[in-house]
């Protein structure tokens, strides 16, 4: 279990580094680098899924609602327990930082999209013509037959 937790921590730290690098690539607008990072990210996610399934294998003897590392740690020796709990805490901190970094990246991407839409709106003229168009004469309200001088 300790080996699996160490690998999980390592892969999550790798994802965090990728997320931080993605932030810089987003700021620079480097699409090619972003695509490469997405490919690397997928490899990390696949490895994490496999490790997570191994971790759940260690916990399978516990009732479903108690399948946590802390619950598992209660059943092992003291030195192994301390190591497991420390790894679980580190993993929790890393996952929290990863979520925050991914939220920042999402906000940066949304701002970039908003800027692109704003720029396109400025560059593309409004479709309404202000000049005379005989085809549009039908769209005008009918003239009143009553004309009065004031």
Image (cartoon, rainbow, N blue to C red):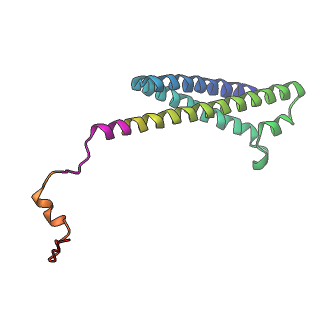
Indicate the quadrant containing the C terminus: top left, top right, bottom left or bottom right: bottom left
Q: Residue at x 28, y 37 (%)?
A: 123
Give the magenta range: 118-130
Q: Which residue is drawn at 43% across and 27% down?
A: 35
- Left or right, 79 with respect to 133, comes to right
- Residue 83: x percent and y percent? 81, 25
Task: Count every numbered label the image shows and give the total.
Answer: 0
Residue 1 in sight? no
Is residue 37 part of the magenta span, yes or no? no
- Residue 121: x percent and y percent? 32, 41
The residue most toward the bottom is 146
Q: Nearer the viewer, residue 93 or 74?
A: 93
Indicate the quadrant containing the N terminus: top left, top right, bottom left or bottom right: top right
The residue most toward the front is 150
Is residue 3 positioned above or below 116 on the image? above
Q: Residue at x 58, y 27 (%)?
A: 15
Is residue 119 part of the magenta span, yes or no? yes
- Left or right, 101 with respect to 111, comes to right
Residue 52 in sight? yes
Q: In which quarter of the image is residue 18?
A: top right
Q: Which of 130 and 12 is in front in this view?
A: 130
């Amino acid at each position: 279990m300790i080996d699996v937790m160490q690998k999980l921590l390592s892969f999550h730290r790798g994802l965090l580094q990728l997320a931080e690098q993605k932030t810089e690539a987003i700021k620079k607008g480097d699409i090619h680098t972003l695509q490469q990072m997405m490919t690397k990210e997928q490899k990390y996610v696949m490895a994490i899924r496999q490790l997570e399934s191994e971790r759940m294998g260690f916990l399978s003897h516990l009732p479903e609602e108690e399948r946590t590392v802390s619950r598992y740690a209660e059943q092992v020796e003291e030195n192994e327990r301390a190591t497991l709990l420390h790894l679980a805490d580190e993993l929790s901190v890393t996952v929290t930082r990863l979520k925050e970094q991914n939220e920042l990246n999402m906000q940066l991407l949304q701002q970039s999209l908003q800027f692109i839409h704003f720029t396109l709106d400025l560059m593309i003229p409004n479709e309404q013509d202000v000049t005379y168009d005989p085809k549009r004469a039908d769209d005008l309200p009918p003239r009143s037959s009553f004309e009065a001088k004031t």
